Image (cartoon, helix red, strand yellow):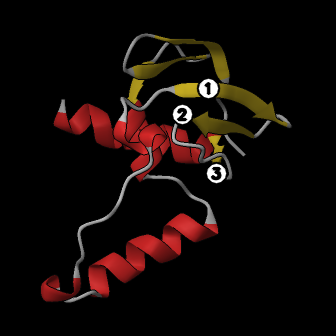
Amino acid sequence: MTDFHPAALSTDDTALIFMWSDGRSDRYPFGVLRDCCPCATCMVKRTEEIEQKPEENLLPVLSPQEAGPLKLTLVEAVGNYAYAIHFSDGHNSGIYTLDLLRRLGDELQKVM
């Protein structure tokens, strides 16, 4: 269990912003959150993409929701340990634990 919790949540046009109880603020771009979705389907898909040979990659056909700019449609608490995040591309099965969000925030702070 963590010693911190979200004190406030907000969004701008491109990111979810967490203000943590310890005073730290993390900005999570929507695309990064979507790419790091922890649901089983996304985890399997990421594994398959790593194992797939380059010549086997086919040009994907995107729906209008997938082709447009990615947005969040809903962020809702799951108990006191996680958030369910719903995306404009229709994906909504990822449960982002506070520990995962904090680790992701650590990584993002290193590269920004």
Which residue is at the front of the view, 65 or 77?
65
In the figure, 20 relative to 90: above or below? above
Q: How many marks?
A: 3
Secondary element at tag 1: strand
Residue to which mark 2 is pinned? 88
Question: Mark 1 near mark 3, Cβ–Cβ under 8 Å?
Answer: no
In the figure, 112 relative to 66: above or below? above
Pointer 2 or 1: first along the chain = 1
Q: Nearer the viewer, mark 1 or mark 3?
A: 1
Pointer 1 or 3: first along the chain = 1
On the picture, is 54 further left or further right than 1? left
Residue to which mark 1 is pinned? 73
On the picture, is 4 further left or further right than 88? right
Residue to which mark 3 is pinned? 94
The type of residue carrying mark 1 is Thr
The type of residue carrying mark 2 is Ser
Graded by Cα atoms within 10 Å as few (under 14), some (14 to 19) or many (20 or more), the crowding at tag 3 reads: many
Residue 98 place in picture, x, y as percent: 63, 39
- Which residue is rendered at x = 59% and y = 48% of the image? 91
Residue 26 place in picture, x, y as percent: 42, 23
